[in-house]
Image (spheres, rainbow, N blue to C red):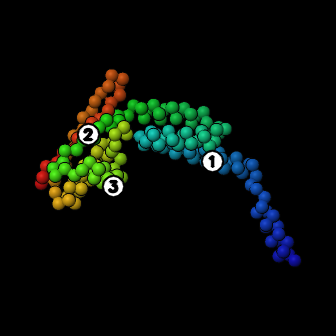
Amino acid sequence: MRWISLTLLWFVAAAIPPSRAADNNRDRVEAAQLFEDGQSMVRAGRYGAAAVTFRTLLYVYPQSSLATQARLALYRAEDLEDQEPKVRSVRFQLAGGPALEDIRAYLEAREVALAVQQPYQPRDVERARLALQDLLASRGQPATVKSAVHIIRHGTGRQSVEVLFTSAKK
C-alpha cells in the first residue's frame, strides 16, 4: 500500500506545472544569457549576429528588465554593422578558367563566407584564395592564386571593397 501511495504522489507531483516563480527565474536567466551572448558577439566584431541575438531577446522576453539595454545594444550593433566595409564585387581571372558556377560551388562547399554585399573580412579573402588554389590543383592545373583588394571610400565615411583573384601557372 505504501508503494502505491508513493507512486501516486509521484505522478501527482509530476503532473503539477512548474511554479510561475520558477518560470520567471528561468526567463531571467535565459534573457541574461542572450544579452551576454550578444555582447560577446559585438566584442568579437560579429555585429550582424549580435543584432539578431538582441532582436531575439526583445521578441521572446519583451518584459525583461534587460529590454531597454538590449534595444540600445541592438541600435549600436546595427550602427557598427553599417560602418563595416561591404564587399562590392568579387572577380576571378584564373588560368584555365573554371566556370563561375564551379567556383561558387567550390567556395560554398568549403564554407568560404566571401560574398557580395556581405561584410569584408580579410580572413575570408585568404580562405577563398587558398580554396581557389586547391580547386585549380584538383583539376590538374596547379597555380599560384593572388588576391588584390581595392577599397573604395564613399563620401558618407563608408567603404566598400572590390576583390580580384588572379592566377599564374606554377
Q: Is residue 130 visible?
A: no
Q: 92 or 134, which is in the foreground?
A: 92
Q: In this image, 80 relative to 14: left or right?
A: left
Q: Earlier in the sequence, mark 1 or mark 3?
A: 1
Give the residue number, with chain letter if any, for mark 1. Answer: 29
Q: Look at the numbered disc 2 and give the secondary structure of its residue.
A: strand
Q: Earlier in the sequence, mark 2 or mark 3?
A: 3
Residue 104 at what x, y percent from top left?
30, 49
Contact check, label 1 and label 2, Cβ < 8 Å: no
Contact check, label 1 and label 3, Cβ < 8 Å: no
Alpha carbons under labels 2 and 3: distance apart:
18 Å
> Hey, what amino acid is under mark 3?
Arg
* Number of numbered discs visible in the structure rendering: 3
Give the residue number, with chain letter if any, for mark 3. Answer: 110
**Foreground mark, 1 or 2?**
2
Residue 33 at what x, y percent from top left?
57, 47
Is residue 5 depicted above or below 16 in this figure?
below
Q: Look at the numbered disc 1 and give the secondary structure of its residue.
A: helix
